[in-house]
Image: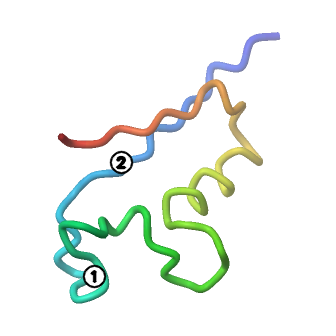
Amino acid sequence: MKNNNFCVIMGGGIGSRFWPFSKEDRPKQFLDFFGTGRSLLQSTFDRFKKIIPIENIFVVTND
């Protein structure tokens, strides 16, 4: 049975709400903001891989 559920994680943005933690050289999606040893992007992926097959999870970023 094919799973037609998909997840698109938006991984871009300038992160102005996370300033001063997020800066041009440290984008917010790569920060371990909660001290868990996982970045915000990794934490989001971890939550969705429980309900969506990993081959159906995509990350979209800007330049």
Place of residue 46 in the rendered image (x, y in percent of width and height, measured from the top left):
68, 55
Q: For residue 36, what is the image quadrant?
A: bottom right
Residue 41 lies left or right of residue 37; in this view the side is left
Place of residue 41 in the rendered image (x, y in percent of width and height, measured from the top left):
50, 57
Q: Residue at x 17, y 76 (%)?
A: 16
Of all residues, the one furthest to the top in this rendering is 1
Q: Residue at x 28, y 77 (%)?
A: 22
Residue 55 lies left or right of residue 24; in this view the side is right
Q: Residue at x 52, y 37 (%)?
A: 7
Disc 1: which residue:
18
Q: Amino acid at mark 1?
A: Phe
- Foreground: disc 1 or disc 2: 1
Place of residue 8 in the rendered image (x, y in percent of width and height, measured from the top left):
45, 38
Image disc number at residue 54: none
Disc 2: which residue:
10
Q: Residues within 10 Å of mark 2 (few under 14, many from 20)?
A: some
Residue 2 lies left or right of residue 19; in this view the side is right
Among numbered discs 1 and 2, the one appearing first in the sequence: 2
